[in-house]
Image: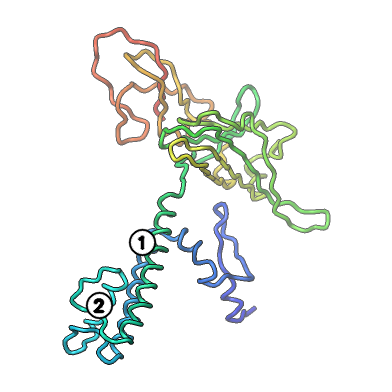
Amino acid sequence: MIKSRSERASTRIVLLGGREVIAEGLRLSFWADISHRSMTASWPAFIAGAALVFVTFNAVFAFFYWIGDQPISNVPGGAYIDYLYFSIETLSTAGYGDMHPQTHYGHFIATVELFTGIFSMSLMTGLIFARFSRPNARLLFADHAVVSSHEGQPTLMIRFANERHNIIGNATARLWLLKNVVSTERQSLRRFYELPLVRNEHPALALSWTLYHILDEQSPLYGLNPDDLAASKVSLIVVVSGYDVVAAQTVHARKSYDHSNIRFGQRYADILDIIGCPGAGSSEDPAAHRLGRRASRAQIPAAHLGSPSRSAGEFSRPASSGRRPARAERSVAL
């Protein structure tokens, strides 16, 4: 079937949870949602767009100066490039003083350009501030969700860590399951279910947090294997929110897992251990997102206390202080 040009223009691909969704229908024009585009554009695209608008404004006003009858003084020969330089000085409100309007036409164009410059500079300042001040949780999620035994029950586990190691107070996590189902009318639907967690709140998230969902009879994942997950196109979505005490704002983070990213019979490496070490305190490995060993393998030995090396999960051995080792919590190598 051949689509018309208008139908093709209203079709776009939306990335949702690692999937490509073809959206057909109404599509907003570029200028209808310019504020959202300005906030979501990458920094190179944002700076390039701002520079393009700046050059366009100056080129247009320089053209109006150029077609006038000597509206600006001290412009030898009336060259367009001189009017362009004067336009840049006026739009940016620099005004060096050697060139200035000398006719009513020149004053009128300069007035309009000054208003445009003040308005555009204020708008650009607000956009830049909004982009810089936008809160970001900086949570590092595990590459895979795992299913293994926990407290004697099959459990779905997802781990994430706070990269900044600042405190996110009253952190709340929610886990959602998306799967394809067929209704009684034989209609294929995409349904979502909230999976209950053993604990969905954290008083002060500063290091890491592992979410647990027990696969009991009430769980939508009960009795499913990897083939069943693939057949239903199962996806998981984790949503975490909390209060960042440094930024004094509520931050949000989200991570999605496709059915291929759910590993059965595996578990994460132990992230805390108690070892003998001089003057040690409690800490966690920032590389906690790496998938750990299989459940049947032996315990991974604890790493030596020291400064983290460039290789994730490796630690340098500290120099011996000669003091008696003290008991302290320490993360293991992943």
User: For the point 25% across and 82% down, which residue is it?
Assistant: 83
The residues bearing labels 2 and 1 have C-alpha atoms spaced at a distance of 28 Å
Front residue of this view, candidates 115 and 52: 115
Front residue of this view, candidates 229 and 108: 108
- 6 vs 246, left or right, is right
Q: Which mark is residue 86?
A: 2
Residue to which mark 1 is pinned:
44
User: For the point 52% across and 31% down, which residue is it?
Assistant: 209
**Structural crowding at the residue carrying mark 2, measured as other residues with C-alpha within 10 Å and reported as few (<14), some (14–19) or many (≥20):** many
The x, y position of residue 318, in whole percent, is: 26, 20
What type is the residue that disc 1 sits on?
A: Pro
Front residue of this view, candidates 225 and 24: 24
Q: Considering only vertical position in the picture, is 182 above or below 123?
A: above
Q: Which of marks 2 and 1 is nearer the N terminus?
A: 1
* Residue occupying the far right of the picture: 184
The x, y position of residue 133, in whole percent, is: 43, 49
User: For the point 21% across and 88% down, which residue is it?
Assistant: 78
Badge 2 marks a residue whose secondary structure is helix
